[in-house]
Amino acid sequence: MDVTVSAKYFYGKAVEGIAGLDINVRKEGGVSDPERVVTMGRHSLKDGNAFFVVNITKIVQGLGGQFPADAVLELSSRVYESATGKEESRVDDSLMFVECPFKFDFSRSKTTYRKGIAHYMQINMLYANGKPAHREVFHLTIDGGTPQEHRSNYDGHYVARIPAANQNFMSRIIQVYAPGFEKCTTGLVLQPYTGDSQIVVDKVDMEGTSFIWANTTINMNQAAQYTGILMLITARGRIVETRYFPPSIDQTFQLEQDVLDKVSPVGRVFAFYVHNAQLVADSSIFHVDAKCREKYNIQTNSHRSIRNVGRIQRHR
């Protein structure tokens, strides 16, 4: 594994000096054991960068040969400035030893579905350390069917459209996994939501644009028996957007940037109508992802995880 230590002054000029690198393997959240630290020595900075090669296989062998699953690889660097002799240190412990390099999170997705209405499933794909897995491929199966290949966006997010059930399922089973890691499959069981009159509302992201999507079981042949559909977007206890639509089966509108700015980082959308004096409603919590990116002083050529095969997950 290649490790780069970068050192620059706050005004951007590269530091002249040397950099050292120490390596330790410890449990996540644990304390470093000085007796297990491996010292990589010191290298001169060139244009503010020092380069190190870390032999992961050798480090694992030094631990007795047993793969340290779920442990972290702690990289500790010290930079010594030539002109003054001052030193600065930085620790990076975001690299993990894992059996499965990815995790999937469905916490933004609903756990119920409506018969006859498509379901939009919010999938977050993460590296083992919890960072978004941007532009990574994964497979999705619906009710044990043929796997479908999808790719996460730059925030590790994907919205999967689950077609409406064409038969009476007691529950629907959704499973996702990264190619080659079927043993790490993550599943979600969708339970049916019963009721004659129904509405589903969700925030859906398509090609970088955010939409509010609503679908109903309104009978358009008897539209006069229904009120229109009212949608409200709220954030921090305030209504930030209101939309009204006449009775319809589905409605979609784009979330403009000023609304997203008011909502960030989290909001809720409500949608409801009245039929035969009965209120029919649904709501969804949704998130607006930050666009900033972290910058590390210590950089590796890995995807923040080390698999149990003596190899590194490398950038494509």
Image: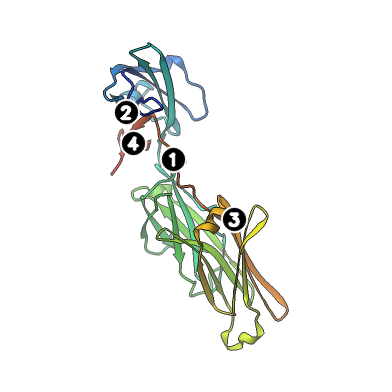
| First of labels 2, 3 by sequence position | 2
**At which x and y percent is residue 138?**
37, 53
> Quick check: 271 left or right of 180?
right
Q: Are marks 1 and 2 in contact (CB under 8 Å)?
A: no
Look at mark 4 in the image and give the residue it sits on.
302
Query: Which residue bears the numbered disc 2?
Result: 3
Q: Where is residue 314 drawn, in percent x and y?
A: 30, 39
The residue to which callout 3 is attached is 267
**Badges 2 and 3: C-beta atoms under 8 Å apart?**
no
Quarter of the image where the N terminus is located: top left
Of residues 165 and 227, the one nearer the viewer is 227
Q: How many angstroms separate mark 1 from mark 3 (CA)? A: 27 Å
Residue type, numbered disc 2: Val
Q: Nearer the viewer, mark 1 or mark 3?
A: 3
Please, is residue 272 above or below residue 47 in the view?
below
| Residue at the outermost top position | 85
Q: Is residue 308 left or right of residue 291?
A: left
Label placed on residue 128: 1
Mark-to-mark CA distance, 4 and 3: 34 Å
Q: Which mark is residue 188?
A: none
Distance between mark 2 and mark 4 Cα atoms: 9 Å
4 or 3: mark nearer the eye: 3
Is residue 92 at least partly visible in the picture? Answer: yes
Q: Quadrant of the C terminus?
A: top left
Give, as a three-letter code, the residue at label 4: Ser
Task: Tell me the colour scheme of the image.
Answer: rainbow
Q: Decide which of tag 1 and tag 2 comes sooner along the chain.
A: 2
Counting from the top left corner in percent of width and height, residue 135 is at: 36, 50
Tell me the crowding category of disc 1: few under 14, some 14 to 19, or many 20 or more residues within 10 angstroms, Cα based: many
Location of residue 3 with respect to 106 vertically, above or below: above
